[in-house]
Amino acid sequence: MAQSQTTIPVLEEHLPIPAVAEGALSEPRSFVAKPELQAKLGFPGELVPDWEKKAVDKLEELLGKYRGLRVYLDICVKCGACTDKCQFFLGSGDPKNMPAARADLLRSLYRKHFTPGGRLAPDLVGAKPMTEAMLEEWYTYYHQCSQCRRCSLACPYGIDTAEISMAAREIMDCIGRGQKYTNEIIAKALEIGNNLGMKPPVIRNTLEGVEEDVEDDTGVAVKYPLDVEGADIMLVVPSADFFAEPHIEGLIGYGKVFHQAGLSWTLSSYASEAGNFGMFIGSYENMHAISNRIRKAALDLGVKRIVFGECGHAWRVAYSFLNTLAGPWDFLDPRYPVPQHICELTLDLIERGALSLDRSANDERVVTMHDSCNIARASRMGTRPGGQFDIPRAIIRASCNKFYDMHPDTIREKTFCCGGGGGLLTDELIPVRVAGAKPRMQAMKQVMDRHGVNTMVAICAICKSQFTKILPMYGFDSDMIVSLHQLVGNAIQLGAKE
Amino acid sequence: MSTLTVLYAILFYVAALILAGGLAWRVWSWFKTPAPLKVFLSPAPLESTGAACRVMREVVLFESLFKSSKWIWILAALFHASLAFELLVHLRYIMVPYPAPFALVQAFAEIGALGLLAGIAGLWARRLLIDRVRYISGLSDHLMLALLACIATTGLTMRLVAPTDIVGVKAFVLGLFLFDWQPLPGDFFLLAHLFLVACLMIVLPFSKLLHAPGVFFSPSRNQWDDAREHRHLAAWNAAFDAARKP
């Protein structure tokens, strides 16, 4: 497989800006969705007749729907400020992973059909018609963008390549060229209710197992309720939290928090997924359908609050879009934000003294935090801008004694993507994921060397999965990556407040 | 009335129409396109005034650029400040009477032009010397710099080497505004300077120079963060609510 051919970058003291290496990542290509799969999402199974024209028509439709797309295709001056910001470029040197160049793949088609300059003097402004070669480049390089928005932060006009890559993927889906990994997950979320396709009995079974484990471990019967009508809080978690490591340790932690605070809560088997891969392919229709499962579950269970677990892109959709997609939330308790992040809830409980935490329980850990890109640059927690950075850190500091941040250029709003976000978390893209992880690995190694850091906290299911896989490839221990609520769960003294 | 005067008068009317019409068309296309999802880049201001300030900081101070690339910021600041200064210098051709305080800038006109050329040279050097920037540069990017460099050079030449009849130029310019055409002095550098400026006016609405009005319309910068408090519906996505069960 691709994995065996992947060369692992050597980590230096500082991250160098690589020389341009054309075609460095032109090989890795994610699997194309089969016709049956495409049909489940309402897309054509294979390239439609006249697909070149259909692509232009779809672009025109999207230009009429999203102001950002139109403005961002018009105003790039090619200043170069973004060119050394994308982790996929920094890890590979492939120039098509420079944001301005990535955007140009779509911009050239836009210029050709929607600007006078492109019609009159195409060569002068880089305008090109849709061809098989263009489609191939789109497919390759728009699936090497994790939609993390680090380029938008750097851009003097805020040009957001995430908007452009979402549009390109939607166009490709609509002409019959979808990506298997993402579309398979969307199909499962739509059919079954979560990205992993876990049916209600499986989830129930898992939660019972978790209850047994926690009771064995602590001697306290912490409940992990499913589909309890009339509960106050519906917790929506990424489905990886039900079984993957280290995700499930986070789930255990959420349950302990609710238990000690005495809150009435439930999970839902119908809305058993916080994630929403509809965003990755720019599909409002699919994003809307997945989001509205949460609305329906909240109505059916009669809950008063909705709380989201640790997941990056899920929190972007939840925080920034859920009100638009699935609101209004007039049937929920107006005293709480809708939705609320588990970190907001946990820190509030800590500050009110409702949790009994013993930091020394995590004394074997020296902790750092990886800010997840979607949480950092596309959402908020709490009442102040930047709460998405300060709230998780406040929880970490309340749960352990030793915490060190990584280099300031690699955290908070300047954070890197883990390298697996935006629909790239699939094995055939391992070379891309390894390249994309390099800046984070370098920054992490720096605090390991300086402060003896041995633990990296993430609050995103994709980050956790990506690092679990990639850390060993860089020679680090895969157990280094932990859920934030794993630290909380370790530190919480369950007997103390009984 | 010489043929030259007539040609240049027509050129500038056409250029002005294209500039105004083209800009209006582009800005209208942005304005009428909905922004149905909140895509502010966080941390973002929580209120509209904060978002307006954020956009103004981008426009006046190039805040994001300052944070992301000091070299580009220095060169871009030099270029844009010099350009703004030269526009100020050129106000004397359209202001009647020309107030004395405005005339003070005339003493520094050459410095402004040199600053403009230095900025252009620096930005161009980056485009040629840095492999990443060279890769993303197209022919039009180089031509745009060439156009600006030629405008600055011809202007500076008139200042330093081959002065033109600026009283005649002012009469010509005012004549255009009043539709009472006056003869245009026939000096080579003046004609070249004016021709290139007209070219700039014509290409502006169809080129990357749109970044000037475009930055005001960038959702990642001009939206404020009230996503949990308010729904954000455009006509097309509001229609989804109706199709929804319960």
Image: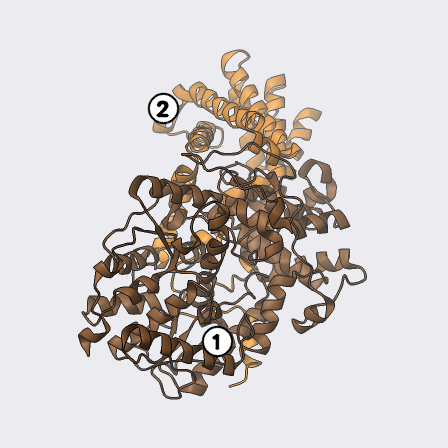
> Residue A272: which numbered mark, if any?
1
**Colour chosen for chain A:** brown
Q: Secondary structure at mark 1?
A: loop
Q: Secondary structure at mark 2?
A: helix
Nearer to us in this view, A3 or B151: A3
Q: Where does the image place residue A487, in percent across and percent down from the top left?
A: 31, 62
Alpha carbon distance from label 1 to label 2: 70 Å
Mark 1 Cα within 10 Å, few/some/many (few <14, many 20+)?
many
Identified by mark 2, the residue type is Leu
Task: Report the disc number at residue B104.
Answer: 2
Q: Quadrant of residue A217?
A: bottom left
Query: From what the image shows, is residue A119 above or below residue B93?
Result: below
Chain B shade:
orange
Residue A279 figure quarter: bottom right
- Quadrant of the rendering where the C terminus of chain A is positioned: bottom left
Q: Residue at x 68, y 30 (%)?
A: B6
